Image: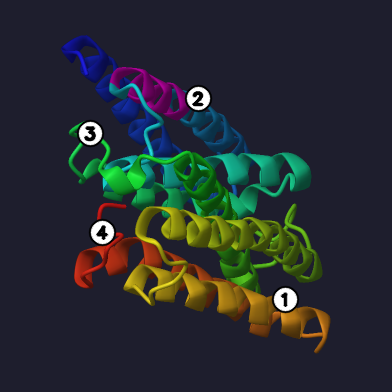
Amino acid sequence: MSQTLINIENVLFYGTVAAYVMATLGYFVSFALKKENMAKIAVILITVGFCLHTLSIIVRGIGAGRVPLSNQFEFATAFAWGIALCYLLAYRKYKVSAMGTFIAPILFLVIGYAAMQSKEVRELMPALQSNWLVLHVSTAIISYGSFAVSCGISLLYLFYDKISEDRRKGMPEKKKLDMMSYRVITFGFMFLTIVMITGAIWAQRAWGHYWTWDPKETWSLITWIIYALYLHVRINRRWSGKRTAMFAVIGFICVIFTFIGVNTFIPSIHSYA
């Protein structure tokens, strides 16, 4: 990767980080002081950050000569990109600015984690030299981004009763927040299922077996089971409200551990990811 492209990527990436940080601060100010204009500015900042983010990923892909989804930095920044994308889609559909107060910090933490990783562009190891890489990882980005959004909505639901009535003006009722989280999780679960299926097929092609109970595989399965249970109790047991909101938060904690915890603390054949 040429030095010129590296410099362009760095400018775009740190511009992205700055936009997300300012958006997070904007949401906090809006939420604490009930300044609706600050929330609108924060949405604009996330939109600007998302555009810069997209360009930085494109520039890295051009420089690397491949899809940039092969190491911890690349997946972390793509994870943050997926959160921003899913948030902007959810905001466009529901127009609930208050959820940004809980989603923007998640976005900031993930992009911050990406910034701490090595940005070195390396050659793909043999296991990653597969067309399954793009499908498997891109669906993971969408599913993880969806779960981050559902976690933010659920946190808003859980803190709803602690918010003064004056600051609730303009917010949807708790029942609508509950339904929003359910719909986002349903969307994310569909993509997570594709992640599991494509991962198994890819593993068989790369290593000759579909499943090995590797820590990453195991925690991915645990995460899938948690969200499957969420949908089960929601549909068949008619659960809703606080119980399902807690499910959504716990599920996303498992997502974070699957992505960061396993790579950091547990030896895995997926450690390169």
Q: Nearer the viewer, residue 229 or 71?
A: 71
Estimate the x, y position of residue 87 in percent, counting from the top left: 60, 46
The residue sitting at 26% across, 52% down in the picture is 272
Q: Nearer the viewer, residue 126 or 37?
A: 126
Q: Which sits earlier in the primary sequence, circle 4 or circle 1?
A: 1
Queried whether the magenta region covers residue 186, the answer comes back as no
Type of the residue with mark 4: Ser
Query: Which residue bears the numbered disc 4?
Result: 271
Task: Please state which of the two labelled residues, at mark 3 or mark 1, is closer to the viewer.
Answer: 3
Quadrant in which residue 268 is drawn: bottom left
Tell me, yes or no, if residue 162 can be seen here.
no
Q: Which sits earlier in the primary sequence, circle 3 or circle 2?
A: 2
Query: Which residue bears the numbered disc 3?
Result: 123
**Element type where label 1 sits in the image:** helix
Q: Main secondary structure of the magenta part?
A: helix
Q: CA distance from mark 2 to mark 4?
A: 29 Å
For the N terminus, the image quarter is top left
Crowd band around label 2 with a 10 angstrom C-alpha radius: few (<14), some (14–19), many (20+) = some
Tell me, yes or no, if residue 205 can be seen here.
yes
Image mark for residue 231: 1
The residue sitting at 55% across, 57% down in the picture is 195
Is 164 left or right of 265, judged from the image as shown? right
Q: Nearer the viewer, residue 30 or 54?
A: 54
Type of the residue with mark 1: Leu
